[in-house]
Amino acid sequence: MDSKAVIIPTYNEKENIEKIIRAVFGLEGEYHIVVIDDGSPDGTAAIVKRLQKEFPARLFLIERSGKNGLGTAYITGFKWAVGKGYDYIFEMDADFSHNPDDLPRLYEACSKGGADLAIGSRYCAGVSVINWPIGRVVMSYFASVYVRKILGMKIYDTTAGFKCYRRRVLETIDLDKVKMKGYGFQIEMKYTTYRLGFRLCEVPIIFVDRKEGTSKMSSGIFGEAFWGVIGMKFRKIRPVSSPKTTAATIQD
């Protein structure tokens, strides 16, 4: 059976973390979870540690001190999962904006459909977003249009953060040279995957804005993505034979 690791970054997600963990573990197919917590003062990590006693072989925690950015959290998780030899590695939010029931669809797009990176897409089948203010929908949608025009990458949802990678993709990308830390990170990872010759596909999903907890979105995140895309177009992208590792506090 293929091994599957779901990476979930957290900062102050005490309202959601136990529910999302139980929802993922309720799926067929033996998914494992690694939570990357950036020193949440609300006790998110303590909840994960309690649940580790119930799921000792499936739930893992990496604790980092302070908020270091979404991108660096995922890179920490990628390196951990690659080092453990997982076949398929997922990105997913903790707040249920990504439906855990869609994880098998992303997995099948890679395992059966031949994709190297499967993207849970809000825009490949129209606009499938619930409970977002119209201004945020418009900003997100046209951000992806902008990225497609600048980078020539035929992906409708370039900022999507619900994804499934084959391990070989993350083994090939030089993760230490990924520059963006906010939502621009999602664009950079897709574009790097594309430029290295891997196959990307979009799987339509319905994105539902969080019901509990606080959004981490800010205008600075969009600013980084806007200017970063221009620099990305002219950057040389080279593969590596194996990813480097970084130290982190891992509870497993």
Image (cartoon, rainbow, N blue to C red):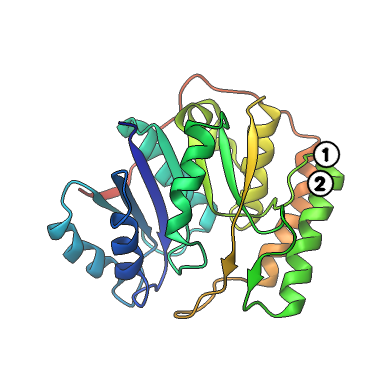
Q: Which residue is mark 1?
A: 152
Q: Residues within 10 Å of mark 1 (few under 14, many from 20)?
A: few
Residue reaching furthest to the left? 53
Q: Secondary structure at mark 2?
A: helix
Please determine whether, in this image, residue 175 is positioned above or below residue 65.
above
Depicted 211 relative to depicted 67: above or below: below
Marking on residue 172: none
- Quadrant where the N terminus lies? top left
Q: Quadrant of residue 30?
A: top left
Q: Secondary structure at mark 1?
A: loop
Q: Nearer the viewer, residue 147 or 124?
A: 124
Q: Are marks 1 and 2 in contact (CB under 8 Å)?
A: yes
**Crowding at label 2, few (<14), some or many (≥20) Cα neighbours within 10 Å?**
some
**On the image, numbered disc 2 is attached to which residue?**
148
Expressed as whole percent of the image width and height from the top left, the position of residue 28 reads 31, 48
- x and y percentages locating residue 77 in the rendered image: 40, 46
| Rendered residue at 54%/22% (across/down) | 240
Is any atom of residue 63 visible in this view? no
Against 50, residue 82 (above or below) is: above
Q: Is residue 87 visible?
A: yes
Q: Amino acid at mark 1?
A: Gly
Q: Residue at x 81, y 61 (%)?
A: 142
The amino acid type, in three-letter code, at marker 2 is Arg
Residue under the image location 18 percent in, 54 percent down? 55
